[in-house]
Image (tube, coloured by chain):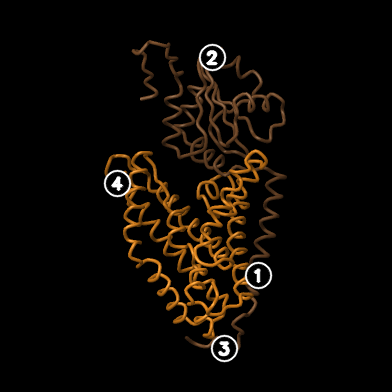
Chain colours: A orange, B brown
Amino acid sequence: MSWSAFRALVAVTWRERLLRPFFGVLLVVFCATHVSVALASEGLHDPVFLLVLAIGGGSVGKDVSSGVLPLLFTRPLVRTHYVLTKWFSLASAVAVLSTLTLLLEAAVLAHRGMGLPGRDVAAAVFGSVSSAFGTTSVLLFLSVLVSGYSDVLLWIGLGFLPTLAHKYVPQRVAEQWKMLLNPALDWDATFRGPSIGWFRLFSYLSTVTLCLCLAALAANRKELSYASG
Amino acid sequence: MRPASSMSTRARPTVLIALAAILFVARLASGVNDALHPPRAGGLVNWRGLDGADAAAAAAHKPILYDFSASWCEPCRRMEIDLFSNPEAAALINGSYVPVRVTDEDPAPAAKALRAQHEVEGLPTLLVVYGAGSEPRRLEGYAGRRPTLKFLQHAVKPRSVRKPGDERLIDPNDL
């Protein structure tokens, strides 16, 4: 994929996602809520899930429903490149916003005399960024399969499955399921122990690549027309 | 937009498939390795077994701190590294409690009975058990070092049991 095509897709996605009229209001509410929760709990409160849902939801499905995707695919654009660029642009937007919110929380906590060590803040940012790229890959895969914002509903529904069936599902399975839907890396658990948590690291990377791979394969099989969605 | 050379727009993502396959195999291999050789805990807390914990707590006049955890549990590992490897937290636990670890993999009937008795469903769970007459206190999940440390500092003393009609008894731990 050419650099200019990549840049154009990233810029279009950011513009479309971040400059929506209601998004500014939503972002201010997110930040205020998270800073309040951080002050109440005297610790950082990661906003990444709400941001992923607000920004990453309907990533491909919305393009299908609005008719943008059939038009875009008339161009000589490799579908895998489209999927990967979409993932990168959404995940990076989520990562930047969640990092800024966490830094704001850390600054407010420090101002109130509850400052956290820089290492803890860095670990929280690392977890948030990994979660942004991980969860966006899952949502992107779901978004290729369904139209509009149904991917968000599907993701929430899948997340509730172990809770609904908690009497029949062992906690270990429930935790693996949660890790599959919200792939994230915890700095402390993965890198700070007596040995590197290879299973955690490979689980994360495997889930992300698997979701992107399946999303690309599903996009390749997708037949689009202006009546799609 | 530059034409994608001779590449079909529906070209198979070969590199991505290969990468996903390699990482999936690595995931399976590391999972099997972790199951065969569970990672060793590196904490500073002097955990002891279930046997004789009651007697030790009674002799030392300390409450028992049960840590219900599992090797596969992500928040448990985080708590191990973040809390139990922290000198301040470890000193508090070793000095004020009789720390007992009950892992999910422990097949002993006593461990199963304890889990059932205290209805432990989520991991990690910290449970502080005092002598007769005091209600145990528990903390489920791991919300970070600071709130957990606060819980451990407060939970050293048992909660006062309020008598019906006695409005003057206020539990400072509940404030």
Q: Secondary structure at mark 2?
A: loop
Q: Secondary structure at mark 4?
A: helix
Label drawn at residue B99: none
Q: Secondary structure at mark 1?
A: helix
Label drawn at residue A108: 4
- Residue underneath mark 2: B131
Q: Few, some or many C-alpha atoms within 10 Å of disc 1 (few <14, some 14-19, many ≥20)?
A: some
Which comes sooner in the sequence, label 1 or label 2?
1
Amino acid under disc 3: Ser
Q: How many marks?
A: 4
Pinpoint residue A67: horizontal percent, then vertical percent: 49, 77
Residue under the image location 46 percent in, 22 percent down: B156
Which comes sooner in the sequence, label 2 or label 3?
3
User: In whole angstroms, how far apart are the C-alphas of marks 4 and 3?
Assistant: 52 Å
The reply to whether the C-beta atoms of the residues labelled 1 and 2 are less than 8 Å apart is no
User: In whole angstroms, how far apart are the C-alphas of marks 1 and 4?
Assistant: 44 Å
Q: Chain of mark 2?
A: B
- Residue underneath mark 1: B17
Residue under the image location 38 percent in, 19 percent down: B171
Amino acid under disc 2: Gly
Amino acid under disc 4: Val
Q: Few, some or many C-alpha atoms within 10 Å of disc 3 (few <14, some 14-19, many ≥20)?
A: few
- Residue underneath mark 3: B5
Pinpoint residue A218: horizontal percent, then vertical percent: 62, 71
For residue A28, side relative to residue B46 (left or right) = left
User: In whole angstroms, how far apart are the C-alphas of marks 2 and 3?
Assistant: 77 Å
Task: Give residue A225's quadrant in the image.
Answer: bottom right
Task: Give residue A9's quadrant in the image.
Answer: bottom left
User: In whole angstroms, how far apart are the C-alphas of marks 4 and 2?
Assistant: 42 Å
